[in-house]
Amino acid sequence: GAGRMKQLIMDLLEYSRTGTNKDIAADTDMNEVINEVLKVLATSIEEQEAKLVIGPLPVLPNTSKLQMFQLMQNLLSNALKYHGEQPLLINVSALKVDGDWQFAVQDNGIGIDPKYADKIFVIFQRLHNKSEFSGTGIGLSICKKIVEKHGGKIWVESVPGQGSTFYFTIKNRMDAEPDYVPHGV
């Protein structure tokens, strides 16, 4: 119980810090970000014998590298956690849609009932008992907060038993006013 409370407090602190204007806005190479995330998750990837397919990812202008790292780490951690019986396959890709970047993190895991598609982004909302899957129910709400801070939106498309695809958009913010302290100021 104490360990779970400690994790909950740490997650709440992380959630409250997300979206503060203390991060430096700069160009964020998402290829570098995903490589750093893969290093952090290397043990889990190896344990799950997961295969990852990473497409070419863009450099995002005027973004927080730390928050992009948190976003990708949370999404990939969930894909690794909520796996099914079949060998785990995770695809990460990005494409430009209406001038903004749309990312997809797709897995072949246990999936989510579509009726819970919005609920999973609400803080403390969990679809599984803590004895089935660990966690505090804050990860996806942090993802939502990060994406919205960067002018985008996040959603999921899923089929139970077949997997999920988490999509998020990030505004192409070259001409936008920064939400963060510009680099060098």
Image (cartoon, rainbow, N blue to C red):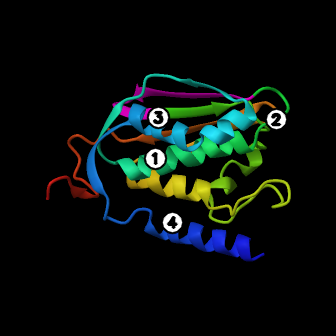
- Asked if residue 80 lies in the magenta stretch, the reply is no
Crowding at label 3, few (<14), some or many (≥20) Cα neighbours within 10 Å?
few
Residue on which disc 4 sits: 14
Q: Residue at x 14, y 59 (%)?
A: 185
Q: Nearer the viewer, mark 4 or mark 3?
A: 3
Q: Are marks 4 and 3 in contact (CB under 8 Å)?
A: no
Q: Residue at x 67, y 41 (%)?
A: 44
Asked if residue 9 is positioned above or below residue 78 in the image, the reply reads below
Disc 4, SS = helix
Disc 1, SS = helix
User: Looking at numbered disc 2 in the image, what kind of residue is underneath it?
Assistant: Gly
Residue on which disc 1 sits: 69
Q: Is residue 9 left or right of residue 49?
A: left
Q: Where's residue 104, x and y in %?
A: 55, 32
User: Looking at numbered disc 1 in the image, what kind of residue is underneath it?
Assistant: Phe
Task: Give the mark nearer the N terminus: 4 vs 3.
Answer: 4
User: Spatial distance from mark 4 to mark 3, Cα to Cα?
Assistant: 22 Å
* Residue farthest along the left direction in this orientation: 185
Task: Give the mark nearer the N terminus: 1 vs 2.
Answer: 1
Residue on which disc 3 sits: 35
Q: Nearer the viewer, residue 97 or 161?
A: 161
Q: Is residue 33 visible?
A: yes
Quarter of the image where the N terminus is located:
bottom right
Q: Is residue 125 left or right of residue 30?
A: right
Crowding at label 4, few (<14), some or many (≥20) Cα neighbours within 10 Å?
some
Quarter-of-image position of residue 77: top right
Residue on which disc 2 sits: 84
User: Spatial distance from mark 1 to mark 4, Cα to Cα?
Assistant: 13 Å
